[in-house]
Image: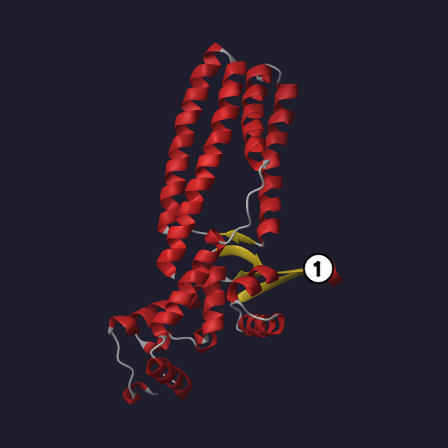
Amino acid sequence: MSHHELDPVIHAPKRLAAMALLVHASSADFPFLRDHLGLSDSDLSKQMAELSRAGYVGVDKRGRGPGSTTTYRVTRAGRQAYAAHRAALEAILDGDVVPGPTEVS
Amino acid sequence: MNWKVLRMLSGMESNGNLHETLRAADRAAAAPWVDYPPTPWWHYPCFGLWAAAMVVTYGAFHDHVVVFLPCYLALIALVGVYIVWQRRRRGVSPYGWPPREVRVVCGWYLAGYLVLYGIVVAVMVWSWACAAAVAFAASTAGLVWFEAGYARAVRRVRSRLG
């Protein structure tokens, strides 16, 4: 296990939680994510836009106005990135790796 | 490793919050399985009626394909409608393996349903009307039991994840 698997995009706690949720759902809509993650509308939009830019989540918008829905689903790349990041974090907790300046390339 | 990742790691470890971050991720991962709105009361008898309708459709019409097939397909389509309705109501569709506490309840429910299936088939040999009544009563009661067990499992998951 190496620190190369740590992903700066997923590492932010809000995005890590969002990815953890989406990996265990075939899709989740905006209100569910907002309510569960305890974020404001604007903050959630910002975090999800970041994940979308990285290609980790897909966005599906339907309708306009009050009845519109925005649904998110994790992509295959997102699923792999989350699994790798999670494994790297657990390896750090298990003491398998020790971060140090020698690893800086 | 680049400096950004190294900075990220050192900040994380000096804060000593890696455990809490992973715990929050675990809570989020369980959310699709444990965060759900209360089940409406009519849900249980409707499921019982659906199971009974399946039995009646087979028992009364299996010799009349023209009637049997559309009725059977309509009942199967109802499952699809139900899944879409639940997904919209909850705002999420769970995927993959549920938390272990929930898995146990689902396993018992599935086992119970297989036993019920066997009983209904056995009763059907004698009378499809009685089999339909058994399917209605057992499916309704089984779902009530399952929901109660599921709620207890959810409380255990929440307690474990903090």
What amino acid is labelled 1 in the image? Ser
Q: Report helix, strand or loop for mark 1.
A: loop
Residue B70 lies in what quarter of the image?
top right
Q: Is residue B88 above or below residue A74?
A: above
Total numbered labels placed on residues in the image: 1
- The residue shown at (60%, 35%) is B42
The reply, left or right, for residue B98 in relation to residue A74 is left
Q: Position of residue B7 (x, y in %)?
A: 39, 86
Viewer-nearest residue: B60 or B130: B130
Residue A21 at x, y = what percent?
Answer: 48, 61
Whether residue B98 is visible to the viewer of this picture, yes or no, is no
Q: Residue at x 45, y 41 (%)?
A: B148
Q: In the rendered view, does B98 fall on the left or right side of A51?
A: left
Label 1 chain ID: A
Packing grade of label 1 (10 A; few <14, some 14-19, many >=20) is few
Residue B52 occupies quadrant: top right
Query: What quarter of the picture does the N terminus of chain B occupy?
Result: bottom left
Residue shown at 40% from the left, 82% from the top: B8
Q: Is residue B66 above or below residue A70?
A: above
Model colouring: secondary structure
Q: Foreground: A50 or B13?
A: B13
- Residue B28 on image: x %, y %: 46, 62
Query: Residue A51: x and y, percent?
Result: 53, 71
Above or below for A101 versus B31: below
Disc 1 marks which residue? A68
Instruction: Name the residue at 62% across, 40% down.
Output: B81
Q: Name the quadrant containing residue A72.
A: bottom right
The quarter of the picture where the C terminus of chain B appears is bottom left
Residue A9 visible to an observer of this rendering: yes
Q: Is residue A11 above or below residue B120?
A: below
Name the outermost residue toward the right: A65
